[in-house]
Image: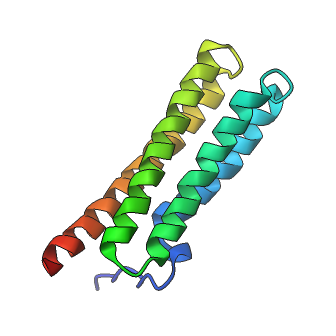
Amino acid sequence: MDEQPAKVTRYQDLQAWQHARALVSMVYKSTKSFLPLDYSLCDQMRRAAVSVVCNIAEGDSRGTNRDALRFLQIARGSLAELETQVLLCVDLRYMESRAHDELQAAISLAGKLLGGLIRYRANRLKEKE
């Protein structure tokens, strides 16, 4: 028998939010080693990661698909910012390639999950128009 996907009743049930939350922990762990070297970049990376998960939560908690889309787009922008900052860490030799590869894979998955959520919300918005 086919399994039906679990009904999402709160933002914590969203795979995109769950993965973004795990990404925050990965970023905090990855930046511990170079925090004393470059507090500014480390802080920006942490803020970008937190922004992703918080904007997913805020967007999903809004009453309309239009509002949700706006916050999900902000989350996608923060994710791109984080991806760029990870690349800068490699350029500056703050991060080894293994750590980069792990973070890049997590960022990529977060982007795919977020993209799917954006498409879902955009389609729901079109249906109502």
* Image quarter (top left, top right, bottom left or bottom right) of the C terminus: bottom left
- Is 39 located above or below residue 5 in the figure? above
Q: Is residue 84 above or below residue 124?
A: above
Answer left or right for 18 relative to 77: right
Q: Which x, y percent locates residue 58? A: 52, 69
Q: Quadrant of residue 19?
A: bottom right
Instruction: Indicate the quadrant where residue 26 lies.
Output: top right
Residue 33: horizontal and vertical position, in percent?
A: 81, 29
Q: Compare residues 108 and 38 and report the one nearer the observer.
A: 38
Task: Report the residue at 86% width, 26% height from top.
Answer: 36
Query: Which residue is depicted at the point 45% across and 73% down?
Result: 60
Q: Is residue 90 left or right of residue 10?
A: right
- Residue at figure coordinates x 58%, y 21% from the top left: 88
Residue that appears at 58% across and 36% down? 102
Give the color scheme: rainbow, by chain, secondary structure or one colour: rainbow
**Nearer to the camera, 53 or 110:** 53
Q: Can residue 23 be seen here?
A: no
Examine the rendering and report whether any part of residue 64 can be seen: yes
Query: Where, quadrant-wise, is the N terminus in this rendering?
Result: bottom left
Q: Position of residue 99 (x, y in %)?
A: 65, 30
Residue 38 % position (x, y): 77, 23
Q: Can you say whether 101 is above or below 17 in the image?
A: above
Residue at the far right: name it.
36
In the displayed structure, would residue 5 be above or below residue 101? Answer: below
Q: How many marks?
A: 0
**In the picture, residue 31 is in which quadrant?**
top right
